[in-house]
Amino acid sequence: MATTSHETHEHDVIVIGAGGAGLRAAIEAAAQGASVGLICKSLLGKAHTVMAEGGIAAALGNVWPEDNWQVHFRDTMRGGKMLNNWRMAQLHAQEAPDRVLELERWGALFDRTKDGRILQRDFGGHRYARLAHVGDRTGLEMIRTLQYHGIHQGIDVYMECNVQRLLKDGDRVCGAVGYWRKDGEIVVFKSKAVVLATGGIGKAWKVTSNSWEYTGDGHSLALWAGADLIDMEFVQFHPTHMVWPLSVAGLLVTEGVRGDGGTLKNNKGERFMFNYIPEFFKAETADNIEEADRWYTDKKNNRRTPDLLPRDEVARAITAEVKAGRGSPHGGVFLDICTRRPADYIRKRLPSMYHQFKELAGVDITREPMEVGPAQHYVMGGVRVDADSTASTVPGLFAAGECAGGMHGANRLGGNSLSDLVVFGRRAGLHAALYAKNFGGQLAVDRGQVESAARDLLEPLERSGSENPYTIQADLQQSMHTLVGIIRNEADLKQALAKLEVLKERAKKVRVEGGRTYNPGWHTALDLKSLLTVAECSAVAALERKESRGGHTRDDHPYTDDQWGKVNVVLRLRNGALQVSREPLPEMPEDLKALFKERQ
Amino acid sequence: MATTFTLRLFRGDAKGGTFRDYPVESEEGMVVLDLVHRVQASQAPDLACRWNCKAGKCGSCSAEVNGQPRLMCMTRMDLFQPGETISIAPIRTFPIIRDLVTDVSYNYVKAKQVPPLRLKPPEADGTYRMMQEDIDRIQEFHKCIECFLCQDVCHVIRDHEEKKTSFAGPRFFIKIAGLDMHPLDTVDRSRFMKDAAGIGLCNITKCCTEVCPEHIHITDNGIIPLKERLADEMDPVVWLLRKFRGVKPKTNA
């Protein structure tokens, strides 16, 4: 089969994905003197980071001098229900402030304090106002800053190029095979090190804040290349998204609304979050309205409002209110900032929210409450990495950002994602470049692997079959929505896995019309493979973990179980079969453990 | 509550093409991009169209809807009469790849030419101070989502391919303005603005401002101040005055 006509590009390091983590990795690898190729599925600057709204968490201490990395570390671990890789959480808390200041040096313009420093806002699960932000469009500022800094660093950018398979030379990775979306031509990258920074897996669910790109590419590429995945059962359903009109269901409503004073209410007008304060957070959460409202301005003498409990808690509470018949007309709850803050303040602090409700729902958030509900937003699970170097279990393969696991444990705090991207993006770029530098031997690209990837690529265009890729994607999203959603149980998960088997078979019969030139039907067909892979990983891990913790709630195992708090669910592919095991968490050193013994 | 519309979509590539009609149902609250997706899912799976966020934040789904440059994801169907035929064409200023997708690489070439930020040394503690009122204006420019609709409607390049080499376009004028007005920047971009970016070619018709989905005052707040500054730079009186006041000029890019 004459599929092997292809172009080849050679680099010390290739970075797959050009959101915050990928861009930061590429910049760092280039700074180390490596030749870098940055590959992205979309145009540069369009990656999902652009959608991040509320801010980037870093203990700068500009608003609350009491804040420091230890407090941030503690908040992160507690938010993650102690399942985080402690070392990642530590590095993250320690390095986030430097990364934020670095963004400022590269041109980011965060909102300011009165004395001209970076302003910080309140967010769920953070003890102090900690999120550096630009109104509610922080992700846009971050990606634009990294993009415009990055284009002057001698990085080769491959836009609208979709990687389908990693290449291996023995045990180590040696590159990747993909295709150009523009013309469907096959492209081979030969490289000493590969950084995965592909983001999440949200497109496996029906209602998600994630864009079409989030098809679990990095998770799947790593798994297929022999790497371990951890924590795939932990999927974050962010509590507040638009629920109406239907066409925008899943559009994110920033936690910044609550950070800036907004409150959740049911259809009786009750601030219901006071009824859902879990034991774990009781000591640090206000149990009455007066204290909660005082907390915004006086954090020393008051406890945090339950509206800003971690996302998993709030999402479950909203789900319960709706189920009990106390929801809003379109199946969500009310998020009210209009009665709590002046219109000018709302427009200044939350311009995108104002704009998006006004233009897409005809709702003026300075006059009316918003209707909001949970949607899939983030996956905590990902490629198992070494905390310091971001190295996966496969030599030469690194991972950072959402596609890496461990940092956020069972649940991610808002604002910790943007900081994760730059902290571990930098580390991935650094260590991938060092790995490439120290790499002594010659890389050999195996022609057979390229041929086989190329054959898989072209199959949907050539085979006889009648399945429509969009239909399979929609069926998958429906299954995951109903069976692997916020609340799970054994019967549903088993049913999901059975459905996935059927979908996998159907995917083998996908046939697409048209040619190789910018053909979204073909691209959707190719993305199904990774999408089905991550859906299965998530369902398998969810079935394995028989407890409820963070972003994994089982109504047949409703309690948190200490024994399960000591292990990660690990997935790996061996001889084509998905293996599941429970493996102990890295042990936290005593000095860090002591941070959890102090009273708040 | 479903209403049927006809989408008249451009189908074709660099070699040529034609508009084809697709009847498609719309439900309450839908936007043009929803209907395009419905056409893809049921009638034309290979219909080429770019999109990412479907929330007006990434600027990928620019197209000319009934001749108006717009983001498809922010164009609500209730803007149209039920049963109306709505034409959707690719943005015209850039070479077509296929259907609604164009080659916008011109913009990435221009982006790279803009001399980047170079900051003053920081305060003694290693950080910077900037007052909110000094960055309000630039934050407006930073709202740009790079949808390139302003580039699409700009008269200088829309019908004059040959001008593309010597003209950066409104998107990059506000990029330059953002760098130039940055309180800590030290680079002088006047020569670049005048020569390579060709700001003199802009005759301030404000078409760019009109189509900006982020409502950035591209002309009034970006281009005009840049033009004024450039005029001042070339003015010997202003030059002398600055010398007299001891204002340190920015270093040349």
Image: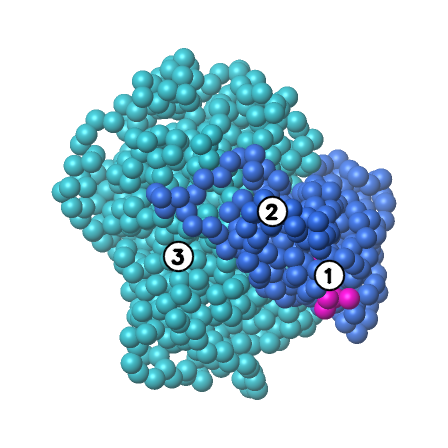
Chain colours: A cyan, B blue
**Residue occupying the far left of the picture:** A590
Looking at the image, which residue is at 56% across and 47% down?
Answer: B246
B85 lies left or right of A302: right
Q: Position of residue A579 (x, y in %)?
A: 30, 61
Question: In the rendering, at what x and y percent does residue A502 appear?
Answer: 49, 58
Q: Secondary structure at mark 3?
A: helix
Closer to the camera: disc 3 or disc 1?
A: 1
Is residue A379 visible in the rendered image? The answer is no
Q: Which residue is mark 3?
A: A425
A285 to A539, vertically: above or below: above
The residue pinned by badge 2 equals B244
Give the amino acid type for the residue marked by disc 1 in the picture: Gly
Q: Chain of mark 1?
A: B
> How far apart in space, not on screen, are marks 3 and 1 (Cα)?
37 Å
The region drawn magenta spans B163-170
Picture disc at residue A96: none
